[in-house]
Image (cartoon, grey):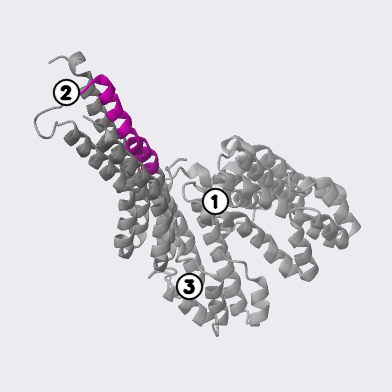
Amino acid sequence: MSEQYTYAVARIRALEVGLFSNSTIDQLIACQDYGQCLQFLEEKGWGDSESSGDAEAILTREEEKIWEVVKDLHIDMDHFAVLSYPKLFHNLKAAIKEVCTGEKNRHIYYEDVSIPGDAMREIVSEKDFGKLPAYMQHAAAEAYESLLHTGDGQLCDCIIDRAALDAIYEAGKESDAAIIRDYAESTVGVADIKIAVRSQKTAKSMDFMKRAMAECESVNVDQLSKAALAGMDAIRDYLLGTAYAEGADALAESPSAFERWCDNRIIQTISPQKYQAFTIGPVIAYVIARQNEIKTVRIILSGKQNELPEDSIRERVREMYV
Amino acid sequence: MSIWENLGLVYALLGAAAAVFLAGAGSALGVGIAGQAASGVVTEDPSKFAKVLVMQLLPGTQGIYGLLVGFITLSKIGLLGGGAADLTPETGLLVLAACLPVGIVGLISGKSQGQCSAAAIGIIAKKPDQFGKAMLFPAMVETYAILSLLISILAVTAIQI
């Protein structure tokens, strides 16, 4: 047993006390309006003096705080690379669209990743894809060429999203940490199910689904694609025979219940880390839990801003880690 | 004074050294591991200092047990009184064997108790009101250190010199 992460895990345990529990989320939902929600968050220590009253600034500050903690623990950041892949591929997608369409929008990029907006735009505009990590190069060139020649934005998205899933899965397989392997497996499995559900609703072809879905151990892409072609009931029947059987119930309930289950499934995957004392798992789980917390608060704030009823917001709220 | 002429005394002294060295090393490892966890908690919440300090100290007892057996052994062979006993090699080896339980069990249990304390510090970090229960887990490991201490003391005192 290695004691390399003993300090980090104990510190994370102390920080977990500050994570929002399901009851805290209930209190936030029970706030009368958007302003009261912001006040509640500030009372809980969210944001800082500069972000007061500005929801987006508060949420951005909270995201920054996560990485400040991780950097303070002096853990090799390579362990967390897989968590940044979705943002990194988003930046690639945004840069390709911006370069190909000529529409400038500086606010569509994530800046807290290894290749921020300006750098990504420069790489894409110069078609210097060799500067990208190996797992992005081929997809970047293919997506760029396809958007340039066909103008099909959905195909571009499909190529890049598939590359992101493949990269996450590969990172999981290569990782020594069990949590990264489990996270990658669940992320890819759930993403494949989401693709199947959306493809069924929009009547996509088998070829499209096979192009969009990434191979993984917990989901058989071929069977899932065939089920999606056969209908929603066939998807549910297929899921009942997999590790994602709860997804079938959520799918039967409502689209928002299904979306909530997709995120909850990731939280369930990381939950066993609450009982680990000496691995990097609890640190990675904390980062995922904090990101899930911020996402949930964003959903609630959005619901409050649009004056949605409490039940409607509650239906969309994700399960908390603690 | 040749070592070969006093081989019995050398063996007995080795026994005392093994008890102190091995059990002390176990405690040092254990206290170090628990100390890392305690530091992690106190970084975020200094108010838990007293509780985590108790947890950190738990694996320190093995070193004390080793020291106790070391003292008894030195006293038994007369080194503390100034007049070393004339021990045969066989008697020296008996003393060495008598010292090994507390040394070996102290080394292993010290480190294990440190790991257990580190995990229990995680309980205190999240639920400080469960301090009593959290302390029981590493305290269980102590049982085996006490058993080995008992056997070492009984064995050392039972040897006729």
Quarter of image, res B71: top left
In the rendered image of this protein, does residue A306 appear above or below residue A322?
A: below
Q: Mark 2 belongs to which subunit?
A: B
Q: Earlier in the sequence, mark 3 or mark 1?
A: 3
For the residues labelled 3 and 1, the Cα–Cα distance comes to: 23 Å
Q: Residue furthest left?
A: B82
Q: Which callout, 3 or 2, points to the residue nearer the camera?
A: 2
Q: Is residue B93 magenta?
A: yes
In the rendered image of this protein, does residue B51 appear above or below residue A89?
A: below
In the rendered image of this protein, does residue A92 appear above or below residue B128?
A: above
Number of on-image labels:
3
Q: Residue at x 67, y 51 (%)?
A: A186
Q: Is residue B82 magenta?
A: no
In the rendered image of this protein, does residue A128 appear above or below residue B31?
A: above
The numbered dot on residue A54 is: 3
Q: Mark 1 belongs to which subunit?
A: A
SS for callout 1: helix
Q: Mark 3 belongs to which subunit?
A: A
The residue beneath circle 1 is A117
Q: Which callout, 1 or 2, points to the residue nearer the camera?
A: 2
The residue beneath circle 2 is B86
